[in-house]
Amino acid sequence: MTTPTAGQATRVQGRRRGVDLERAIFEAAINQLGTVGYAKLTMEGVAAAAHTGKAALYRRWGNRDELIRDALGNLLPEPPSVPEGTSLREGLLTLLRYFDSVLFGSKGAAFQAIAAESASDVTMLRDLFQARVTTPCQERIRSLLRRDMPTSGAATLDEAAEKAFATVGPAMLMYNCVTGQDRSTDQQIEAIVDGLLLPLAQTKRSADVERPGAHPVGYEGSG
């Protein structure tokens, strides 16, 4: 079998179309974001890294913000579903492992680059991460907590307490990312769950049960 020359290989790459070309551009954009940072990222640099022409980018995106938004949106996985019957502990571990993997996985440098930027023009990218990852993850944590409360015989938590509980774990992992610390180990994530979140949930349950006028789940009153 004849091995293609470098020029032939380049021409083959140049014939990429549709999904294949878009995937190559997204990969190049994310890699550039992680290596040169947001401030120095250019459409020209992405095109060169993707082995395509700059025109191929501008046919799809008007500027680098639009390109990076779509590249990150394509990359960000949704939080996993936690099956019914999963314990609060196991559900929390699953969701915090997911959150940590998004921040520090194979493309984690891109998110760290965004988190470290102080310029106002990355607000849109932070908002995207919030909408696609942080908020859905927190909603699943709140759902887990609500599912667990009836089995404990405790009163329901109010919305503010639920939100506060759901914020703690992701916030701690995000702090590690923003401050340039190493990715959390599984033992460290377990320590967050076992040493902080579960005791916090138990403390809140006890406070709600003991609070005058608090009623167990399912209480309907006397009419």
Image (tube, grey):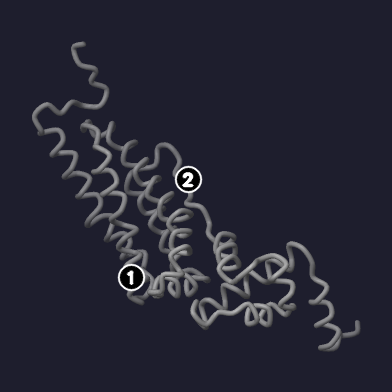
Check contact, mark 1 vs mark 2: CB within 8 A.
no
Measured from the top left, where is residue 69 in percent x and y?
A: 55, 63
Residue type at numbered disc 1: Asn
SS category of the residue bearing label 1 = helix
In the picture provided, is 40 more to the left or to the right than 188?
right
Residue type at numbered disc 2: Ser
Q: Residue furthest right?
A: 1
Within the image, what quadrant is residue 184 found in? bottom left
Name the residue carrying label 1. Answer: 176
Within the image, what quadrant is residue 100 found in? bottom left
Measured from the top left, where is residue 124 in percent x and y?
A: 47, 62
In the picture provided, is 44 more to the left or to the right than 166?
right
Q: From what the image shows, is residue 165 above or below residue 111?
A: above
SS category of the residue bearing label 2 = loop
Q: Nearer the viewer, residue 176 or 131?
A: 131
- Local crowd size for mark 2, using a 10 Å CA cut-off: few (<14), some (14–19), many (≥20): few
In the picture provided, is 216 more to the left or to the right than 76?
left
Q: From what the image shows, is residue 161 above or below residue 12?
A: above
Tell us which disc is closer to us: 1 or 2. Answer: 1
In the picture provided, is 31 more to the left or to the right than 121?
right
The alpha-carbon separation of the residues under discs 1 and 2 comes to 25 Å
Measured from the top left, where is residue 5 in percent x and y?
A: 85, 88
Q: Split into 4 quadrants, where in the image is the C terminus? A: top left
Name the residue carrying label 2. Answer: 81
- Local crowd size for mark 1, using a 10 Å CA cut-off: few (<14), some (14–19), many (≥20): some
Query: Which residue is painted at 39% across and 45% down in the image?
Result: 139
Q: Nearer the viewer, residue 46 or 75?
A: 46
Query: Which residue is painted at 22% across and 45% down in the image?
Result: 201
Q: Nearer the viewer, residue 213 or 149?
A: 213
- Residue 62 in sight: yes
